[in-house]
Structure formats: C-alpha cells, structure tokens
Amino acid sequence: MTGRRLSFNARADEYRLARPPYPERVYDLLAQRCGLGPGTRIVEIGAGTGQATGELLARGADVVAVEPGAALAAHLRADLPGARVVTADFETADLPEAAFDLAVSATAFHWVCTEVALPKLARVLRAGGWLAVWWTVFTDHGRGSEFRRGLDALYRRFLPHEPLDKPPGPLGVESWSAELAHGGFFGPVEVELIAWQNQLTRESAQRLFGSFPNVNELAAPDRLALLDAIGSLVDSLGGTVLDPHITAVYLAPRA
C-alpha cells in the first residue's frame, strides 16, 4: 500500500494537472454541517497538489495541509502559499492537540492506517469538531456511456485482472461508515453521494487515467499504448466526452 500511495509523488507534475476539482456541493456540505467558513481551522490529510486545499482557502479557512510526498508538497507550497504544509505521513506528523475545528481528506483517507489516524484526529480536533472525508469515484456503473463501454474494453485488454464489475470501495457505505465510527471517536456518520459528469478531451482523459496507480504499474510500452487508445476513443466520439463520476462524502462529529 505504501508503494502505491507514494506513486503519485513520482508523477507530481502530471497529477497536478490530471485530477479534476471536486463538486461545489462538497464544500456546501462542509459549510452547512461542519462550519466551514472564514477562520475555520482545518487539518487536511493527504493534500496532494491541493485540489481541495485551494477551495478550502477560498472559503476563508486556515489550512494545515499534511502531505507525505515531497514533490506533491512542493506544488502545494508554490501554488497555495496561504496553506501551511507539513511534509509527513499523517500518522507521524507533529500536530498540536485540540487545535482544529475540522479534519478533511479528499480521495486520500484509504491510504492512512485508521487505527492510528482516528484516535489522533480525535486528539487534534477540538470538542465539537468534525471529520469529513470524501472520494471521487471515476466511474458510475448506474450511468453507462459509449465512452465507458469503450474504456472497459480497453481495460479488459490491457488490465485483464482489473475487477471492472466490483463496486469501488468508497461506495461501500456500510463498511466505510463502520470504519469511521470504529473505536467510538467519531459518529454518527452521515453520507451523501454526489453524481456529476466530468468533461474530458483527448488530453485530459489521457492525463486522468494516466494518473492512476494501476495504469502506471504497466510496462512503459503498454502504458503508452493504453493512453494512446484512450485518446483515440475520445477522438472517435467527437473529441469531447462526458464521463459520469460519483463523489462520496462522509461526515462525522467528534464524539
């Protein structure tokens, strides 16, 4: 798991451009339920290159962004000087107790050890603080499309062992709710699934799918061939496609 977690750091420049922003609804939920607004003190777990960090800062929050990848953290410091960046694993990061109102993690919480992270989060959050974790799932089995059918065919060719029909982990609402409530540090857990569409061109589709660990683990010729085929698929569908995504948001108050 550690190797895959740090794989993003090896392609930090590409990752910064590849990943789409999160739906506005995510931040509206944080404002409505968790008090996000001017002066909110936030610790962000696995901030990457700041896809969520920038929006949190734009809403007036004070953000401490914890990111273990040095190259990813360098982009955070360069692009978002308003954030304080800590280059460390969250499990070992030196953070003050009861110093934050809200802890967030955007498409990153599956990389942390929750047995360590949850009690630590309870310590660094003030009484009445909140935990908010969310993931964008880059597929939606309930909303098929010609692009997705073509993409699935390419995955079966280049990544034959990839479980295409298995629901992605973040959509396992019962299991993730139980995981976040484990130990009694947080709860009750609230969940919202946000359906949206990501507009992709040849270039943005290649960047997006080229940012995933399973694609990057292919031998270089196969990786390039897959990405070229994805680009050709987009071209065959008019040069632009709308790809259905789901962002799964989990919110829980500190117990």
Image: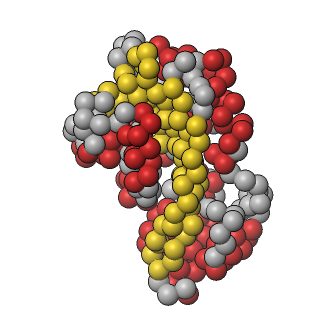
The quadrant of the image that shows the C terminus is top right
Residue 182, compared with residue 203, is above or below; it is above
**Residue farthest toward the front in the current orientation of the protein:** 32
Across and down, in percent, residue 225 comes to 59, 72
Is 9 placed left or right of 61 in the picture? right
Across and down, in percent, residue 196 comes to 52, 63
Q: Nearer the viewer, residue 54 or 77?
A: 54
Write the residue at 25% across / 38% down: 60
The quadrant of the image that shows the N terminus is top right
Is 144 placed left or right of 38 in the picture? right
**Residue farthest toward the left in the current orientation of the protein:** 81
Q: Nearer the viewer, residue 148 or 58?
A: 58
Write the residue at 25% across / 35% down: 38
Write the residue at 72% across / 38% down: 174
**In this figure, which colouring scheme has been used for the structure?**
secondary structure
Across and down, in percent, residue 61 comes to 28, 35
Determine which quarter of the picture holds residue 222. Answer: bottom right
Query: Visible in this render: residue 83?
Result: no
Query: Visible in this render: residue 141?
Result: yes
Write the residue at 51% across / 84% down: 235
Determine which quarter of the picture holds residue 220. Answer: bottom right
Residue 38, compared with residue 245, is above or below; it is above
Is 205 placed left or right of 70 in the picture? right
Across and down, in percent, residue 77 comes to 26, 39
Residue 158, compared with residue 92, is above or below; it is below
